[in-house]
Image: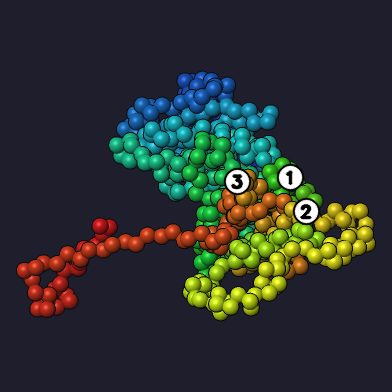
Amino acid sequence: MTGWQHKQFLGTGEFTLEFGDYQVKITVPNDHVVASTGVLQNPSEVLTTTQRQRLEQARTAKKPVLIVTPAEAKAAEKGKPTGKKTWVFHAKNVRDFAFASSRKFIWDAQGHNVGGNSVLAMSFYPNEGNPLWERYSTQAIIHTLNVYSRYTFQYPYPIAISVNGPVGGMEYPMICFNGPRPLEDGTYSLRTKYALIGVVIHEVGHNYFPMVVNSDERQWTWLDEGINSFLQYLAEQEWEPNYPSRRGEPAGIVEYMLSPGHDPIMTNSESVVALGPNAYGKPATALNILRETILGRELFDFSFKEYARRWMFKRPMPADFFRTMEDASGTDLDWFWRGWFYTNEHVDLSLEKLTQYTIDTRNPEIEKPLSKKAKEEAPVTLSAQRNKPLRKRTDDYPELLDFYNKWDEFAPLPSEKKAFETYVKTLEEDEQKLLDPTMNFYAVELKNIGGVVMPVILSIEFGDGSKEEMRIPAEIWRRQSNTVTKLIPTRKEIRSITLDPHLETADADLSNNHWPRKPVKSKFQLFKEERDSKRNPMNESKADAAPPSSGNN
């Protein structure tokens, strides 16, 4: 604990507060609808009989129920208030309080059971938000509560609200404000649709981090934004097939990690230059890699849930997250935290070289035929090719040919066979088994160019067309972080090897991930300059000359 946070807000680091109970009275014009942190204490004083009935119906409904309909919101917008109403809300164990008030609000709600806790999910939005908000907002709230609770802890509050407000997205306990709307004619783009779903998931998700796991946003933006962006990715992927998530996939963070001089994740919130990729995208990607590639889903999910559970309604620091993940998983992850959180290095592992070894059996009946085959398959030099048709002296004087001109240098000699038999007798039975001429030993030389050590994932294709995937833990780099060699014993011949075949490590340069090397594919663009044949360009100044048009031709 560092006590009260006295650091000034300079535009990036948000806020951090202690927990408390709130009783708030909000007095507004009597035609307004109020959405707020906490539970409404006086519904009979501020809601109509019909609204109270609808709200009661919503608690057990299978779909969102309109408490205030679009038609009622339009009618209220055209009228004028005749007095005032005071709305009373009570909230327990929250670190802040927020509300919204408007006569334009449509209000829908649906009760939902989250692990035994009955939660009222609600959305407030004007007619300008439809049809997008009525279709997606409350559904996205419920989806968020389901997914986040499964990976962390049961949602502890009785209310979860999404409000269409003037900001892109902002979170408070039990309530958040989200900006995306359709166009004026009610149509919306694909981007706007997923922007709304994604931001509702993200902002409602902040109820878990940092509204319950109360990290210090003024100091460490990533500890809530990054973790929340990771969970947002998981929730989005459970929304529909092929959901276009902006953050989480390793390939999506490569460009930022390659940018010169970018800040490490462990940089104070107000000092980070590119907050989005630094505090949201990179930690979300790191946790996704930790889950999928380093620990595996089962062990990661157990450890992550343990962190969330241990630090509910407490003030964790980054070290608490790091230690808890290691403690719960039983895995030393110092190398991972260092590379991804404390440096601005990137991932670039290169498959430098492949060397094939076989056993020298010392058996002349095996080794000499192999040597003969190697000689026959060796390339013939250009000089040898041109010298072959030349007439030789032995063509005119065959008596110059002797025994050695006919002798097979690769024929095993009796003395060599006897020497081998004597050698075998000196070996134990298990040692004799090692003299296996069918075994191949491939030495794969790997180089760490980017600086961040990562597991080595190899997809191996053999000469017979079969494939095998080999996953080597990051500990392969423990003694030498620049270059390592992995020995692969196999009876098959290797045809090709691909490093990081599933794009799971954020490798920045894929051109060095193949043996043998593959050509780097690119395209030329053709540009055609259009000229006015009637105009003499020599008589024009640069200021008067029209710029040439360009395009793909």
Q: In the image, is 448 to the left or to the right of 257?
A: right
Looking at the image, residue 82 lies above or below residue 314:
above
Marks 1 and 3 in Cβ contact (< 8 Å): no
Question: Please, what secondary structure does the residue beneath circle 2 have?
Answer: loop
Category of crowding for the residue at label 2, using alpha-carbon neighbours closer than 10 angstroms: few (below 14), some (14–19), many (at least 20): few
Tell me the amino acid under the disc marked 2: Thr
Residue 403 visible to an observer of this rendering: yes
What's the mark number on residue 416? Answer: none
Looking at the image, residue 118 lies above or below residue 493:
above
Residue under the point 30% across and 39% down: 184
Image-quadrant location for residue 375: bottom right
Marks 1 and 2 in Cβ contact (< 8 Å): yes
Category of crowding for the residue at label 3, using alpha-carbon neighbours closer than 10 angstroms: few (below 14), some (14–19), many (at least 20): few
Tell me the amino acid under the disc marked 1: Leu
What's the mark number on residue 299? Answer: 1
Residue pointed to by mark 2: 331
Residue 292 visible to an observer of this rendering: no
In front of the other: label 2 or label 3?
3
Residue under the point 63% across and 76% down: 399
Quadrant for the N terminus in the image: bottom right
Tell me the amino acid under the disc marked 3: Gly
Quadrant for the C terminus in the image: bottom left
Give the distance between the C-alpha atoms of the residues marked 1 and 3, in whole angstroms: 34 Å
The colour mode here is rainbow
Looking at the image, residue 411 lies above or below residue 170:
below
Q: Position of residue 356 (x, y in %)?
A: 68, 61
